[in-house]
Amino acid sequence: MPVYTYKVKNSEGEIFSGETKVNSKEVLLDLFNKHGYKPVEIIEKTFVTDVSQISIFRKKVKIADLAQFCRQFSIMLEAGISIAGALDVLRDQTVNPTLKDCLNDIYNNIQKGISLSSVMHSFPDIFPPILLSMVEAGEVSGQLDRVFTRMAEHFEKEHKQMQKLKAAMTYPIIVFVIAVLVVVIMVVKVIPTFGEALLGMNVELPKLTQIMLNMSNFFTTYWYLVLFALVVLIIGIKMMSKTDKGKNLLDKIMLKFPIVSDVIKTMMTARLSRALGTLLSSGVLMLESLEITRRVLNNSILIEKMDKAIESVKQGRSLTQSITEMQYFPPLIVSMLKTGEEAGNLDETLEKAANFYEDQTGEKIQKLMTFIEPLIMIGLGGVVAFIIFSVLYPMLSVYQNIGNY
């Protein structure tokens, strides 16, 4: 979305300046005319005048930033501070530059009389759909402080889940990096040294040894091509994951592995329970809650199934029936949904389910990492053993022949 800096004049001749994000210059002009401001100067920011307009240089707003924003906002609203007053404090205290610029823009628009939810909808790349819908529901019900409290809890739990995942993956990643470095050192340094020694003996090398020497020679000579190919591969996978077909393919590949598939399903169950329970508890209607939950799942296969479930609910079926027809979620969550619907406390049931499956996700991730660690070590041992055997075997044969003489 384009960023514009502007100067405007009110009916009394006072000049105000600021910065905002809107879809086009025409939309901004309409906004000024609607509120009685006469434009003096409007300039669109580009990457030439502001490097932060290039996405790779713009710092992302993380879940932890959103959790802190919602928590601080809720505390100030509960204390009786106005929305504009709370935003004024938050924009000064916020460290993340992207979120800080966003809050500055929101504050300026709030001062012009625009509603909080309307302004926040202008930043879909910063505020997720669940937060936008919750804020809108909070404005209608007059419970904005409670909404931000719930969202703070939601993002804090999501952040905690991500931290558990990162903590569980740290050691396997370190082991994998060390394994790769060991193999690279052997291919680049060790094999060429032994290769020179073998060539000096003027002996016929086995095919396996010759292949290893040729590979080592290729990597040492054309290392930049190998590095370039790796970078292209990583970028290619990342770009593919941003397309619908590419993401669908990657999600299907991940679900082919039984242990990984189990972790993903448990994680998606926790995410659905948390998002849907949070939305329903704030008074968002069922269909709208399902639509928003569908967007926060971030799994193409599950999203396709959710589309069918939403259509099923539209046709008058219960949520339990629709979720059961998906044939994706475990029987326990289906039973809990049925109980919650019958008892009339679906939001509370979903919150309990979210807590349970978030704990289950942490345990299953830990089991997955425990399974991966020995696989990496076995793989490293196998590669190193193969390299050593392919190099030492001809040398041992030479020494054996010398001993026979």
Image (tube, grey):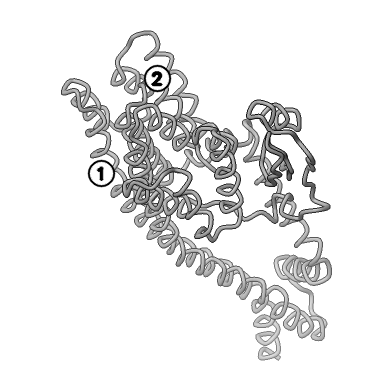
Find residue 142 and report its image quarter.
top left
Between 33 and 328, the one nearer to me in the picture: 33
Residue depicted at 66% across the width and 40% down the height: 21
Quadrant of the image for the C terminus? bottom right
Position of the N terminus, as image quadrant, is: top right
* Res 210 label: none
Left or right: 286 as drawn, with respect to 88: left
Mark seen at residue 356: 1
Residue type, numbered disc 2: Leu
Residue 12: horizontal and vertical position, in percent?
A: 68, 37
Q: Is residue 318 visible?
A: yes
The mark nearer the N terminus, 1 or 2, is 2
- The answer to which of 117 and 244 lies nearer the viewer is 117
Q: Mark 2 points at which residue?
A: 287
Q: Residue 373 in the image: x percent, y percent?
A: 43, 63
Q: Can residue 1 be seen in this view?
A: no
- Residue at the spot 52% in from the left edge and 63% down from the top edge: 379
The residue sitting at the left extreme is 343
Label 1 is placed on what type of residue?
Phe
Task: Identify which residue is drawn at 54% across, 33% down.
Answer: 113
In the rendered view, does 85 fall on the left or right side of 79?
right
Disc 1 is placed on an element classified as helix
Vertical side of 138 occupied by 317: above or below:
above
